[in-house]
Image (cartoon, rainbow, N blue to C red):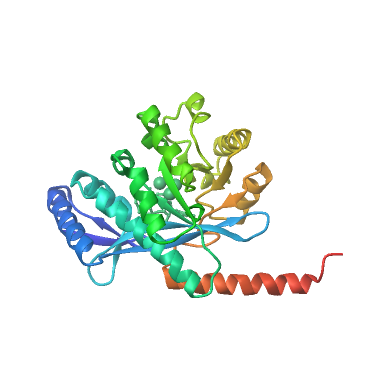
Amino acid sequence: QVKYENRGTYFTYTAQLDDRADATSAIEARLKRALQHEGFVLHYQPVIDITSGRVASVEALLRLAGDRDQLIGPDQFIPIAEAAGLIGQLGEWVAVEACRQHNAWRKEGLPPINIAINVSPLQFRQRGFAQRLQAIVQAAGLDPSCIQIEVTESTVMGNIDDAIHTLKGIRFSGIKVALDDFGTGYSSLSHLSNLPLDKLKVDQSFVRRLEHDNSSKAITMAIIALGRALNLEIVGEGIESEEALMYLAEQGCNLAQGYFISRPLSATDFTDWYRKRTTTCEVELSRRGPES
Ligand code: C2E
Ligand code: MG
Ligand code: MG
Ligand code: MG
């Protein structure tokens, strides 16, 4: 039978081998319904500037509404959406919703919050992807630099010339680009310097092992040095401890994301988190008094 397993931020859909085909078609049916009836939700994970402690951006992370108020995580349904030919539609929903939320936060009195959205390989390779994204951002009346896309190495390395063309179009419109999960794919380092990018995200598999494993430390250090040499901003993701945050800061990583800072939050929880955080920072600053 299909059951849910609590993974902290959402529930994972698990099934026995014989039930897997059933589970897949159940999710596919749920995806189709969700596209028609607002069955998706975006959660937002803060990314902070390590030096100033300010919120630099949030990453939008997609969830599918399951039974009994439970949410299903993207690893469970993105591959199914791709196989079912639904990823283009789904990706557009994400972009529209992120822009809507950006404007909603501004109406609530928050400063402009930069939002990163994840783009799957199939979606990225669809013809007209850059133009459609640009049109969505424009229709929402947003400054394009408030939106960033995250693509993985495999997304861009497969067909490097086409990828460069698409990325150039996106960046030309003012939208930012980050290379996600860096270090796990099959990037050719010589190609990396040709890619039009703004940010490099150090894969969390290294960051999460920093305290336990010297080779993860070495790899993280090398990735940060590489990114800096290429003039990219560097995001450490999967930061679960103060030690990991300190190590990344020492190595010159400028942006940080992970459970140690905050888990992904619903839009309203983010508003609360943001307001509380800003107040605490102000209190700390006033306690410290004016700079001498
Ligand atoms: P990602 O883009 O690398 O996103 C980071 C993932 O790591 C998120 O998982 C986040 O919840 C998790 N994470 C963040 N900090 C920590 C930490 O400190 N510890 C641990 N253990 N995990 C942490 P999530 O939300 O399950 O997303 C998984 C993947 O699904 C994402 O990886 C991304 O590739 C994909 N995804 C998410 N939203 C979308 C979307 O809207 N469209 C597409 N195409 N893919 C998406
Ligand atoms: Mg990402
Ligand atoms: Mg990642
Ligand atoms: Mg990932």
Q: Can the viewer see residue 179 in this picture? A: no
| Place of residue 268 in the rendered image (x, y in percent of width and height, measured from the top left) | 44, 73
* Residue at x-position 62% and y-position 61%: 54
Q: Can the viewer see residue 131 in this picture? A: yes
Q: Is residue 129 above or below residue 39?
A: above
Q: Quadrant of the C terminus?
A: bottom right
Q: State left or right for residue 75 relative to residue 109.
A: left
Q: Is residue 211 above or below residue 281?
A: above
* Viewer-proximal residue among 70 and 270: 270
* Residue at x-position 48% and y-position 74%: 107
Count of marks overlaid on the render: 0
Which residue lies most toward the top here?
A: 190
Q: Quadrant of the N terminus?
A: bottom left
| Place of residue 237 in the rendered image (x, y in percent of width and height, measured from the top left) | 51, 49
* Residue at x-position 53% and y-position 29%: 193
Q: State left or right for residue 123 relative to residue 290.
A: left
* Viewer-proximal residue among 102 and 76: 102
* Viewer-proximal residue among 62 and 19: 62
| Place of residue 59 in the rendered image (x, y in percent of width and height, measured from the top left) | 46, 56
Which residue lies most toward the right here?
A: 292
Q: State left or right for residue 99 relative to residue 15.
A: right
| Place of residue 77 in the rendered image (x, y in percent of width and height, measured from the top left) | 26, 52
Q: Is residue 139 above or below residue 249?
A: below
The quarter of the displayed image where residue 282 is located: bottom right
